[in-house]
């Protein structure tokens, strides 16, 4: 299968007052079309930089980022982004928020068609009846659902998520994992998810990529061969427990600590 | 509704009673301090002057304020978007704002001799644009990068990002500043009206009250100014409700 995203030997350093701060060092990531890549790694290892590279918001010092056979030179309309902060526009209703990307990407699209498209997603994530509410009237989990709708409304090839569920409580987070799974089943798209949650990475991912501590390079890649329509129960199987164990050890290595003996 | 109007109204009545009581208890003559009961006769006696001069003051204040909104927002955008402009302009702005505006009255009346309307509007503008410029600037420069990124990652232009996100997001700060600027603009207008010879407006009426020893008139002018200030302030509150009502959290 062709790789939709190809990050090849990317090295990058931020310029700071006290000299260059290297964040990525020979990073390699390959994400086949239609698959889900979960990226985990220690705090501050350059994961967010990775999202900005794929979104075309910045250029690496060295190396190449390819998207759909084209080298990324700038922002592209075929990308959707979601962050830990849902960044909804408080002065717009939920429906108007979800429509926002269409206003940029498809300015000629008819208002009714935009609304119909937005409502499709709003229904899919279970926000029906809240479309005319303001973001401040919704709970954190609902806001994040709206944010997901917004990042998918223009049918992007790639969805880039930077810890989208990090600020939610554990139960809400599990609900949203399932929503995410259902969204992908309904409308397949390629996904890069940055997360600190190993269970999340295994439940959602087709592969889990462990980055080393800063400057980040690809330390370990774990293919996840679980059924597409997995349920939360799968997290409690010995198979997944073994995977989580290995990933945890890899994180310890990435943090520069000794893995536990078991 | 009753609460919204009744409570402020009651507080005004209480204030007037205390004022009356203070003057009465001290036995002050009205050249020391006029009491509220002296004011209605003054208003009635000069009612046509109050309407004419009040209008003069009002339109010049609003014109100065409008200019402050346009220029203040413009400067705010420049210092909000460019760090270089911010570093370059802040000392100048702060320095200019620190100059007591009363000292500028003779300066501008010498530059624009006889242009009373223009001078008054200019002063109202000069005294009131600073809060607007600063708050718009801060609003824009503190915009979280994620807000920009959701549109930038779709290839939106800087102008689109400004129009769709940065501008509406700064509106609450803008209106907060505008409320401060409203009262400042009145100070600017009256400075020129009082200080410059042959002035017009409520400031000039105050001056004539002083010249003629008509103390109730002077106090009546102050009350009229306070009234206009309140009217204009609530006009801004009304606009804020329309354009930035979303920022208000429902009270629990």
Image (tube, coloured by chain):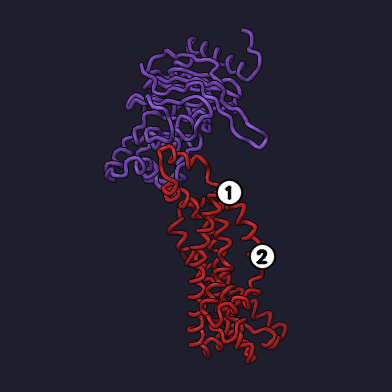
The residue beneath circle 1 is B83
* Residue drawn 53% across the image and 30% down it: A49
Residue B215, by quadrant, is bottom right
Q: In the rendered picture, chain A carries what hue?
A: purple
Instruction: Using the image, determine if residue B168 lies above or below residue B231.
Output: above
Among the chains pictured, the one given red colouring is B
Residue A157, horizontal then vertical, whole percent: 36, 29
Residue B159, horizontal then vertical, whole percent: 43, 49
Mark 2 is surrounded, within 10 Å at the Cα level, by few (under 14), some (14 to 19) or many (20 or more) other residues, namely few
Give A37 or B120, whichever is nearer the viewer.
Answer: B120
Q: What residue occupies the far right of the structure in this picture?
A: B26
Q: Is residue A221 something one can see in this rendering?
A: yes
* Residue drawn 65% across the image and 91% down it: B213
Q: Which mark is residue B241?
A: none
Give A121 or B101, whichever is nearer the viewer.
Answer: B101
Instruction: Using the image, determine if residue B146 lies above or below residue B9.
Output: above
Give B170 or B79, whichever is nearer the viewer.
Answer: B79
The residue beneath circle 2 is B98
Label 2 marks which chain's residue?
A: B
Mark 1 is surrounded, within 10 Å at the Cα level, by few (under 14), some (14 to 19) or many (20 or more) other residues, namely few
Which secondary structure, mark 1? Answer: helix
Residue A196, by quadrant, is top right
Residue A220, horizontal then vertical, whole percent: 53, 15
* Residue drawn 63% across the image and 12% down it: A259
Of badges 2 and 1, the one in the foreground is: 1
Q: Earlier in the sequence, mark 2 or mark 1?
A: 1
Whole-angstrom CA distance, mark 2 to mark 1, is 22 Å
Label 1 marks which chain's residue?
A: B
Instruction: Using the image, determine if residue A70 lies above or below residue B225.
Output: above
Residue A130, horizontal then vertical, whole percent: 38, 42
């Amino acid at each position: 299968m062709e790789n939709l995203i190809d990050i090849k030997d990317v090295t990058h350093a931020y310029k700071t007052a006290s000299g260059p701060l290297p964040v990525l060092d020979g990073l390699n990531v390959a994400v086949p079309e239609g698959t889900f890549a979960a990226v985990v790694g220690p705090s501050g290892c350059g994961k967010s930089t990775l999202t900005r590279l794929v979104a075309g918001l910045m250029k690496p010092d060295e190396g190449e980022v390819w998207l759909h056979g084209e080298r990324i030179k700038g922002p592209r309309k075929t990308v959707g982004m979601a962050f830990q902060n849902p960044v909804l526009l408080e002065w717009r209703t939920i429906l108007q928020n979800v429509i926002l990307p269409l206003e940029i990407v498809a300015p000629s699209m008819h208002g009714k068609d935009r609304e119909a498209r937005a409502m499709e997603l709003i229904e899919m994530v279970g926000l029906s009846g809240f479309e005319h509410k303001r973001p401040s009237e919704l709970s954190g989990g609902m806001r994040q659902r709206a944010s997901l709708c917004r990042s998918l409304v223009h049918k992007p090839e790639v969805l880039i998520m930077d810890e989208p569920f990090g600020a939610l409580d554990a139960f809400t987070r599990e609900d949203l994992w399932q929503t995410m799974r259902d969204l992908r089943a309904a409308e397949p798209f390629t996904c890069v998810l940055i997360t600190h949650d190993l269970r999340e990475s295994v439940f959602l991912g087709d592969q889990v990529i462990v980055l080393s501590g800063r400057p980040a390079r690809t330390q370990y890649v774990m293919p996840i061969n679980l059924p597409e329509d997995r349920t939360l129960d799968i997290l409690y199987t010995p198979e997944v427990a073994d995977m989580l164990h290995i990933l945890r050890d890899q994180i310890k290595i990435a943090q520069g600590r000794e893995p536990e003996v078991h | 509704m009753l609460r919204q109007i009744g409570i402020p109204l009651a507080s005004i009545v209480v204030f007037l009673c205390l004022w009356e009581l203070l003057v009465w208890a001290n036995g002050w003559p009205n050249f020391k301090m006029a009491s509220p009961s002296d004011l209605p006769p003054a208003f009635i006696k000069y009612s046509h002057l109050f309407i004419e001069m009040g209008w003069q003051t009002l339109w010049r204040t609003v014109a100065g304020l409008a200019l402050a909104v346009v220029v203040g927002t413009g400067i705010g955008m420049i210092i909000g978007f460019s760090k270089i402009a911010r570093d370059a302009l802040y000392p100048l702005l702060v320095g200019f704002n620190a100059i007591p505006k009363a000292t500028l009255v003779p300066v501008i009346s010498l530059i624009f001799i006889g242009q009373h309307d223009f001078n008054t509007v200019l002063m109202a503008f000069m005294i009131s644009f600073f809060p607007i410029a600063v708050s718009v600037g801060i609003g824009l420069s503190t915009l979280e990068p994620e807000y920009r990124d959701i549109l930038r990652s779709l290839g939106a232009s800087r102008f689109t990002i400004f129009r769709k996100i940065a501008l509406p997001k700064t509106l609450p700060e803008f209106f907060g500043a505008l409320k401060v600027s409203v009262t400042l603009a009145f100070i600017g207008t009256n400075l020129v009206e009082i200080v410059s010879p042959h002035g017009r407006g409520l400031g000039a009426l105050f001056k004539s009250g002083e010249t003629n020893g008509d103390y109730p008139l002077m106090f009546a002018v102050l009350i009229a100014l306070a009234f206009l200030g309140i009217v204009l302030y609530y006009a801004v509150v009304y606009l804020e409700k329309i354009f930035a009502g979303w920022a208000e959290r429902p009270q629990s």
